[in-house]
Image (cartoon, rainbow, N blue to C red):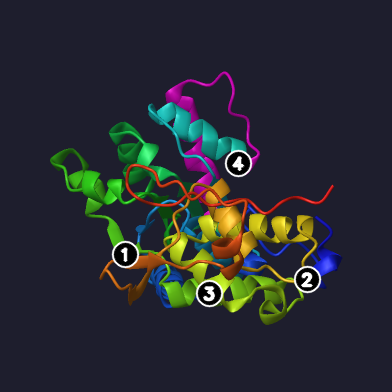
Amino acid sequence: MDCSRFNLDRQPFRPAVDPDSYFPSPSHETALAAVAAGFARRDPVVLLDGPSGVGKTLIARKWLEHLLPDVPRVMLPSARAEKPAELLQAILFDLGKPYKGLTEQELRLTVTESLLDAATESSYPTVIILDEAQHLSQAAFEELRLLGNLETKRGAAVFVLLVAHPMLRAALRRPAYELFAQRIGVRAAVESLTDEESIAYIHHQVEAAGGEAEALFEEEALSLIAGACGGVPRVLNRAAALAMELAAEFETKKVDVEAALEALDRLELEPAESEEPGESGEPVLLQHPRRATDPNRDDEADESGSKKRATRPRTA
């Protein structure tokens, strides 16, 4: 899609984690502050959890940007480790250290030496961020606990940030995880956006790309997208990006209701029901006027009594 068509400098709804497009919702700001406070206190472990797609990884990367350059760090984007050796290898790989052909004890000693040297040189603990941490085994968590025992004269050599699905919080309540759970200084949860925050999120992304949301999205289209995406930024990005592509395909100047409905339909997302009851007392779906008068529209109801939506004819 040619973003200049909509007077944008770049694509506003990118699937990759982009700290420059960070949206400071109250939930995200609270979580970001909690991580920063945990590091300032030198808590051994901080847990950052929330549903998929709400921006946990983005918060972690945004926090990393705030750290001084001389703070050593390890970022594991997919923390899948059944055995301690697998976790130790991943840490060494990210540190740029040799990790192949070593026994588990050799790996442990190499990691220990690297972490202690880094803490001595920089005076800061090495930040280890483990994304998708719910996939770590109990043995891997025990290895992390032992690494937390490493100290220099200036304090702990390791600070661990766990980025995970809420299932990890439940798992850490089990007796087998008790010793590790005791080390967690902060448990910060990231929540989904409200409908109002979802609309503000779309505005923010468009403005970050150099555009104006009011000129790009019809108000009703924004409400449709916000109501159907459940407050999940990842889903909002997909729906808004597809709606823009459809608007370009339809050769319209703005993302209208038609494009929004078509995008939601292709993503199999249900538009939110209106709070205003119809004559029958049942909630009604927001609908674009052109759909109601479209002669090509299929008016045969399905078994639940709902109507099938017609797709706007494409131009050749």
Disc 4 packing (10 Å; few <14; some 14–19; many ≥20): few
Closer mark to the observer between disc 4 and disc 2: 2
Closer mark to the observer between disc 3 and disc 4: 3
Location of residue 208 with respect to 77 vertically, above or below: below
The residue where tag 4 is placed is: 94
Closer mark to the observer between disc 1 and disc 3: 3
Disc 3 packing (10 Å; few <14; some 14–19; many ≥20): many
The kind of secondary structure the magenta stretch mainly shows is helix
Question: What is the CA distance from the residue labelled 3 to the residue labelled 4?
Answer: 38 Å
Question: What is the CA distance from the residue labelled 1 to the residue labelled 3?
Answer: 30 Å
The residue where tag 1 is placed is: 186
Residue 188 in view of the camera: yes
Question: What is the CA distance from the residue labelled 1 to the residue labelled 4?
Answer: 25 Å
Question: What is the CA distance from the residue labelled 2 to the residue labelled 3?
Answer: 19 Å
Query: Residue at (42%, 78%) from the top-left corner?
Result: 26
- The amino acid marked with disc number 4 is Asp
Give the extent of the magenta segment: 95-119
Q: Are marks 4 and 2 in contact (CB under 8 Å)?
A: no
- The amino acid marked with disc number 1 is Val
Disc 1 packing (10 Å; few <14; some 14–19; many ≥20): some
Q: Earlier in the sequence, mark 3 or mark 4?
A: 4
The residue where tag 3 is placed is: 199
- Asked if the magenta segment contains residue 114, the reply would be yes
Q: Residue furthest front?
A: 295
Query: Residue at (46%, 39%) from the top-left corner?
Result: 79
